[in-house]
Image: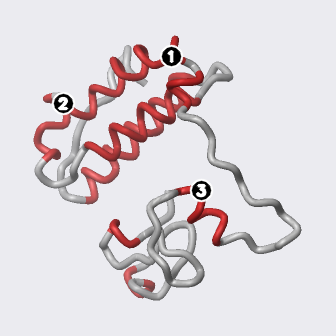
Amino acid sequence: MVRLSSTFKRKVCGLCGNFDGNIKNDFTTQRKEVVTDATEFGNSWRVSTECPNANTTENACSLYSHKKAWALKHCDIIKSDVFALCHSKVDPQSYYDACVRDTCACNTGGDCECFCSTVAAYAAACNESGVCVKWRTPTIC
């Protein structure tokens, strides 16, 4: 997580967005074009032409289908009653999608770490919006 002082509002650009409060234009390339593809966006910010462009990867849930059910079941907490007070303040869909994607992609034994990190990101966004959610339990993260 990156935190900036409000003095940097609208004064930054790059991989973390432009800090104007509008997530729809965060994928702005170096050439000031708004794109929707994460790989295209990331490649636009390469510093050295000696580094090759990244290639688009296949959906991790398709690659590791055995993990998809686990990810869907656990990431559902984001859309559940646990976070109900936050849903009207912070749309859960993009966080849920990221949770499923990241949890499926975490294939080296850190399933819970990947899952917990994405849920914690949603909880942090809720907290920033004034909704404190107690979501961790002895069995969840």
**Marks 2 and 3, how far apart at CA:** 33 Å
The residue nearer to you, when weighing 59 against 93, is 59
Residue 54 image-quadrant placement: bottom right
**Marks 3 and 1, how far apart at CA:** 23 Å
Percent across and percent down for residue 28 are 48, 74
Circle 3 or circle 1, nearest the eye:
3
Whether residue 47 is situated above or below residue 134 in the rendered picture: below
Which circle's residue, 1 or 2, is located before the other in the chain?
1
Q: Secondary structure at mark 2?
A: helix
Lateral position of residue 1 relative to residue 75, left or right: right
Q: Which residue is mark 1?
A: 67
Q: Secondary structure at mark 1?
A: helix
Q: Secondary structure at mark 3?
A: helix
| Amino acid at dot 1 | Lys
Task: Give the class, few, some or many, for how many residues have Cα within 10 Å of label 2's Cα (few <14, many ≥20).
Answer: some
Which circle's residue, 2 or 3, is located before the other in the chain?
3
Percent across and percent down for residue 117 are 47, 38
Q: Which mark is residue 82?
A: 2
